[in-house]
Amino acid sequence: MRDYELVNELSESARAWVDPSNVEQLAAWDGDAGAYWAARADRFDEGVAGYREQFLAAAAIDATETVLDVGCGSGQVTRDAARCAAAGSAFGVDLSSRMIELARQRADGEQVANVAFHQADAQVHPFLDHRFTIVISRHGAMFFRDAPTAFTNIARAMRPGGRLVLLTWQPFERNEWQIAFFKALAAGRDLLTPTPGPFPLNDPDRVRPLLRSEGFEDVQLRGLSETLYFGPDPDDAFRFISGQHAAMVRDLDADTRSRALDNLRASMSDHQTEGGVY
């Protein structure tokens, strides 16, 4: 039995459970949010494609690595990691059963054999001790509700000298796309800046002591700034974003909802380029 098959067998036999702080996350990602992302997996991967090569370069995965991908979604990055670790393996975990199933289907379709996926909460999942040489997460770890507990668990699963590579969002006020969507859908309402949301890991002054307290050394942080892709034209981008943020306008009266959606559609048009909405 190859190494990655052993990891999958042990993980599948373990009881699936979620930390109490992540119950709401499970309800969302294994519910409507996960279904929405799974149905539009290609669009989400296309949206952050500008970071793909930079993220893999930072990970520097060699042929014999054993990789854990936290919050793997539909598994694009996990499959990338598995290809890099041709003589090793990659293991992806996520709260969304639909995205995990899609990740498995795509790995089979692309004939990536040294990869496995499991629905799990990386914050508390009983990974084997000292199992992984590198842990990666593209926009997954930033959703931890109890980051200290999560990184303690992840550190336990890593071999001595292992590496941790995370990609997280910049602070809200530095994300043009979030500001634009939030302002448009507010439709004049005074809404609080979304918090904590996926923002616990965007402050270097918080990240460094957090990781060092969990035993990580030589913590290096680098700010990246790339454009995000939302669709080939304003109408397509509008449908994609309005569906993703439907909860923000669900309780509005008809006139205010219409105004909010018109604002969002106008924002899509404002960012149309020859290559699509960026």
Image (cartoon, rainbow, N blue to C red):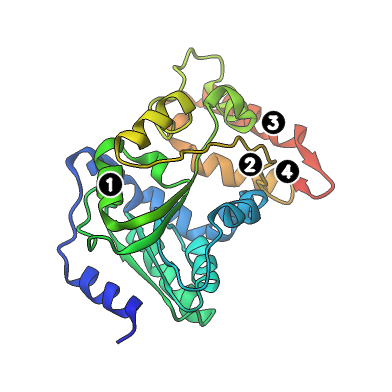
Q: Quadrant of the N terminus?
A: bottom left
The residue under label 4 is 277
* Whether residue 3 can be seen here: yes
Residue lying furthest left: 15
Say which label, 1 or 2, has the lower sequence index.
1
Say which label, 1 or 3, has the lower sequence index.
1
Say which label, 4 or 2, has the lower sequence index.
2
Amino acid carrying label 3: it is: Ser
Q: Secondary structure at mark 2?
A: helix
The residue under label 2 is 238
The residue under label 1 is 27
- Looking at the image, residue 252 sits to the left or right of residue 144; the answer is right
Q: Secondary structure at mark 1?
A: helix
Instruction: Point out the frontmost of discs 1 and 3.
Output: 1
Instruction: Point out the frontmost of discs 4 and 3.
Output: 4
Crowding around mark 2 (Cα neighbors within 10 Å: few <14, some 14 to 19, many 20+) is many
Residue lying furthest bottom: 1
The residue under label 3 is 267
The residue positioned 59% from the left and 31% from the top of the image is 261
